[in-house]
């Protein structure tokens, strides 16, 4: 009988969010899931939902930008005997503003959340995966990863930094058997966050203009299942109705 | 009982080639496959192999660069009652040479095979798919699609032209429900062609340095299965050992 | 006393056009200019204007897509004792259309004019420049060189092919002292062509929204003057008011 | 009599460095130059050299990553009556290392120096330039701005962040008459820094394989002189011998 495997997702918030959906999907595939995020309440809610569908889950309250928190998260993961198969850096923080109205603190925070946290998380995840010479490391990018448009300049700068980090990691660790993936979510996700943060924009898209959470999770799973002889490093995902 | 569906692949050559492998895979998923290529003998061999695994197949000898041939191929497809679900433009023609030694005829031929044929094929495939408002149209690209390096300049020019064509088609037809995909095969495929065309290079790569045919086909299939709310237009595929 | 130098520009049409403006500018810098294009009348008019400002000029009626014409053009150039310093491929042909309404002939013609002609021209220009181990070879690109948007898909495919050609040439011939440059004209040129071909769009841009011919020529000249230790291969040019 | 104009360059170090060379060049064109950097001694040396060639200069010891320092720099600039014509963010900090051996502090520092400082500097420079509706803002990028290769992953991440910032600024402020330029220095500069930091690599390049400081400065100046109807936002600069 095979050893159980595990996945860790950081950036798990509301149940109708990408982090939670990935956790549920990986759980449904038989993996133990570690879910990490800043809100204990939200983690608990997602955990209940995973357990109700028969999965096992560990919640770890984590601020992705704090090295101490990331280290603690991976200490918890290492205590577990399940081999870490998947690690997803799903933190995504976006505060639109004209540049002259962007405070230094905000500019730095967007970078810390979208990129520095990814660096901290990646180092620990890779250290976990190296002994097994396998595992998939996902970074969730956005339209802005490729193009900087006001008022999203600060966000784009942070996402471009993340993209380059992911590319460098792929070049460094693919030969060791670690699959590094950067996804470009080009559009609005049909989840709680956009519905609350940009309600009018969200409405204007209509259901066909939004990315379904489960559809994104399907692709993450199939990319994880790719044979190492034909790995994808980067791919875009957008609703068929989305202009680009 | 559901209507049978079909797929068409153009650029089907040796059995250990990408065209043949995609045909076998789509057949294994229950689709009737139309296979097209210049060599009747090779098509027949692939067809036998598909039938042996229980599939149904139609061979159409086709030169992808000849409008008349492409029209005839789609007339055959239209006679069939199966809805066309997948169309793959898999023609790939590469003749490395320094630019000053590249004959005009060769420069033109590479463009005709890698790009003009794709244009002819796409127009017919889209016309077939539009009434059903669905279908996936694949174009097989290469490393050179993104970077022109001598002695592959003529090839890169043709592949860049193909990539732009695919991108324009995606923008034009995605909203109509047609999924347009451009794959970037970044490496050497473990098939008959590279083994024969570049035997030393092929050997030097070793098995871990080559793309497995079946692994590529897995990804084509899962991209075809994507929900329209989260479609991928472009993705790269490379062996984990491949430097990039 | 130094030997006179020369420049050749192909794609010279109306006087208020980029080809003519480059010719006048290079002439003003002291170069003998060879101007090539399909209309003898237009060439003569540009030639008169160059001679009026004290320059010397040779007109060669040339269809850039005809190998025979290109060879003849360079035979004329080789008869001259002036060393060829600059060669500009400035042919730009754009016929917007939805893909399903784009005739094969039009798709092929756009490629022939935007890319095949550049290949023919580049081979001859490089052969002229190689003995001197110097010279600048310009290719005029467009917004569509980087992005394919309907109804410009066929044009974008041809321009992407040109861009890859230029990139491969730069990699192959820079080490031999030949400077290969690809410009991306991202906007509408304030010349006769746009005024006639897209009068309403042209008007809507306003003077500040259009590229001034002389301003483009200034940049071509300063790029030509770059020291070989710091050459530019690619640069964009757009009006300050142009959204991008 | 015209009002004198000024330029500010941050990231001025050794005399044989890009910052110092740009300062000398802008001074030779008649601009008063403000030079900023961390080492008072190096600034003084560059200042002497500028004054010896007849220019006027103000030194401001500045740590580009410190908001307070940047604000102070621009207070000094604002005291002067010369209109700020050029602002160059020339800070470039590169510490190669495998990712698992890259300390968090180093990762953060590279971002602060290559990107955060640029953000602080750009805000102040733009505020200075807006009332005149003119000025050129340069950001010096590198090969790594476009590609992340180990052991330069952290550097590449920071440079990609800078590039996106520059792109967003160009989109936001070009319409207001501020020219935002991102240069990609693709190669090794023939200056003191590379000679000291990577002596063997520097030697191996040979003189023809290195970017001449004055040649880079020529291009910065001619880009600054571009007419607003045909502005360049991004361009690469590399030695003709450099493979790319």
Image (cartoon, coloured by chain):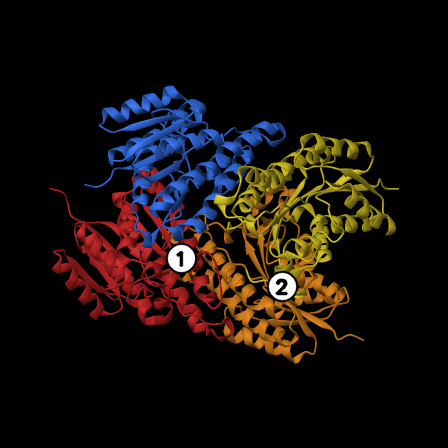
Chain colours: A blue, B red, C orange, D yellow
Q: Quadrant of residue B61?
A: bottom left
Residue drawn at 88 percent across, 42 percent down: D1
Residue B242's disc is: 1
CA separation in Å, label 2 and label 1: 27 Å
x then y, percent, for residue D147: 51, 51
Asked if residue D149 shows in the view, the reply is: yes
State the residue in front, C162 or B240.
B240
Please give left or right for residue C231 compared with residue B140 in the image: right
Residue drawn at 68 percent across, 57 percent down: D195
State the residue in front, A17 or B102.
A17
Mark 1 lies on a secondary structure that is loop
x then y, percent, for residue C176: 60, 70
Q: Quadrant of residue C139?
A: bottom right
State the residue in front, D13 or C88.
D13
Badge 2 crowding class, 10 Å Cα cut-off, few under 14, some 14 to 19, many 20 or more, is some
Label 2, on which residue? Answer: D205
Chain ID, mark 1: B
């Amino acid at each position: 009988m095979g050893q159980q495997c595990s996945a860790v997702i950081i950036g798990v918030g509301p149940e109708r969010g990408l982090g939670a959906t990935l956790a549920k999907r990986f759980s449904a595939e038989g993996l133990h899931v570690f879910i990490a995020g800043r809100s204990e309440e939200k983690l608990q809610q997602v955990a209940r939902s995973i357990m109700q569908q028969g999965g096992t889950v560990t919640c770890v309250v984590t601020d992705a930008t704090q090295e101490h928190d990331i280290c603690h998260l991976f200490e918890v993961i290492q205590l577990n005997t399940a081999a870490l198969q998947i690690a997803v850096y799903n933190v995504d923080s976006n505060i639109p503003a004209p540049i002259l109205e962007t405070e230094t603190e905000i500019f730095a925070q967007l970078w810390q959340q979208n990129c520095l946290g990814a660096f901290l998380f990646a180092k620990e995840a890779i250290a976990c995966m190296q002994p097994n010479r396998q595992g998939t490391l996902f970074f969730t990018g956005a339209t802005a990863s490729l193009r900087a448009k006001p008022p999203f300049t600060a966000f784009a700068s942070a996402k471009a930094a993340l993209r380059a980090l992911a590319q460098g990691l792929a070049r460094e660790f693919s030969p060791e058997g670690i699959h590094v993936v950067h996804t470009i979510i080009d559009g609005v996700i049909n989840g709680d966050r956009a519905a609350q943060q940009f309600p009018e924009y969200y409405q204007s898209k209509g259901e066909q203009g939004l990315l379904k959470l489960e559809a994104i999770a399907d692709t993450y799973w199939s990319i994880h299942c790719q044979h190492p002889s034909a790995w994808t490093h980067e791919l875009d995902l957008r609703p068929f109705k989305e202009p680009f």
